[in-house]
Amino acid sequence: MADRQKPAHRPHDDLPEGLAEQLASDRHRPQYHFLPPANWMNDPNGPIYFEGRYHLFYQYHPDDASAGTKHWGHAASEDLVHWDDLPIALSPTPGGPDADGCYTGCAVVDDDGLPTLVYTGVRPEVQCLAQSTDGMVTWQKHPGNPVIGEPPPGLEVVGFRDPCVWKEGETWFQIIGSGIKGVGGAALLYRSADLLHWEYMRPLCVGEEQRTGTMWECPDFFELGDRHVLLVSALGKNLYFSGTYSDHEFRPEVEGLIDFGSSFYAGKTMLAPDGRRILWGWLREERSREAQIEAGWSGAMSLPLVLSMRTDGTLGIEPAAELTALRAEHAGHPDLVVSPTADLVLEDVVGDCLEIVAEVAVRPGAEFGIKVRRSLEGEEETVVLYDSRKGRISLDTGSASLDPDLSPSAQGGPLELAEGEPLRLRIFLDRSIVGVFANGRACVTRRMYPTRADSLGIALTVRGASATVTSLDACRRASCPT
């Protein structure tokens, strides 16, 4: 191996004077979602469990909060909750195939037990490899990079990036995010005996341009339950396909969205030591570039989410159980009846870093909502809404902020409850993040930026018919700085 990466500075070193204090007092900066100490982050990269620790890499620009030349940031955790900030793993090499940026990729352990990063260098887009011999502290880039130097001959592609690598028997396989001009997004399949010499096979899967986009970014492919799953990022969303995989051919049968909101993107999974499939995503900002740069930070990582395969081929999704470690004091409310005549304000539930767990009996024809980050008179509020008539769960940020530069909206997706099935909600508030998980099978994540210092309240609301909240527990969540 060559081009040893020096132990690059930790992201919190050399912060401009006053920035640390500015970040500490920022009312929009998340407290328990992972993010670097400052500056820009985007896609999760190469999450992997190695020698007793979870490792999370991410696209990072160390100079400021703009989307500049990409590096790989790096953090590690023993419990998925408390993270140690580590030196930057990958930096562009002047004159090298990644001189203009180290783009998204994956992490595996090679046949000799060495942690290995496979990633995209730009420009042009090529696939590169780096390894660590010191426990994932420093990384050495392969002297023969790129290991894949160009797209397959004969294909007119739209993009060629974001490799995902796995092993079957003695053979390594890799898919690369791409798109075929005039056809649609594609995941291109390669194989190798040694991670260095790759042979193109065929597209693992090809989409429809009008329906699933022209280019598939950040593909991820894995076995889950009795099926295989392909994740891709396209059209601003995280799409998934579940189906059968045999003889190196994937046959998608079910299609869906990981998250019904506009913030979650570039999903990437890892296998935990207990067999759980854990998903990470980039939570994008929904404010102006100027506001991000002024704040000195941009982007956050999603919570670690556990995926499961349901009997109908759709994905189940739940926050990882480890997150309960951050629960602090709580307020419980059993058997609350909410009437259409007036909102029910929960006077003892106040805050911007909360977890709310609720079970609700929603009558047919009713729309039940939980208003969060609500100001005293309701000038600002974000509404978690379940519409029983449409079978739909949504997050409405239409009144989330009085900032005229924001473009709030309502976003959501289908959630049909079976007869007699209650609505079960877990809502995570973390300053500018609100994440909603419903009945283990629906997720909506948004960003919001209230302007008022009193936008901390919670209220229950219903239209069409009354609703009974059989239980509601609100826990303050402790911060977990790196």
Image (tube, helix red, strand yellow):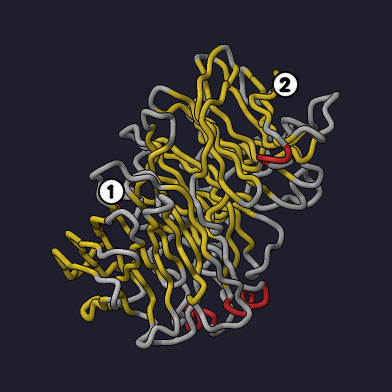
142 vs 334: above or below: above
Query: How packed is label 2: few (under 14 Cα within 10 Å), some, or many (20 or more)?
Result: some
Kindly indicate the quadrant of the structure image that contains residue 479: bottom left
Residue at image mark 1 = 321
Q: CA distance from mark 2 to mark 1?
A: 40 Å
Which part of the image, by quadrant, shows the N terminus?
Answer: top right
Q: Quadrant of the C terminus?
A: bottom left
The circle drawn on residue 200 is: 2
Q: Name the one closer to the observer, 157 or 435.
A: 435
Crowding at dot 1, Cα within 10 Å, few <14 / some 14-19 / many 20+, comes out as: few
In this rendered view, identify the residue nearer to me: 121 or 372. Answer: 372
Three-letter amino acid code of the residue under disc 1: Ala
Q: Position of residue 112 (x, y in %)?
A: 50, 25
Write the residue at 74% across / 46% down.
Answer: 98
Q: Percent from the top left, x then y, of residue 409? A: 55, 67
4 relative position to 158: left or right: left
Q: Evaluate if marks 2 and 1 touch, with contact meaning CB atoms under 8 Å apart.
A: no
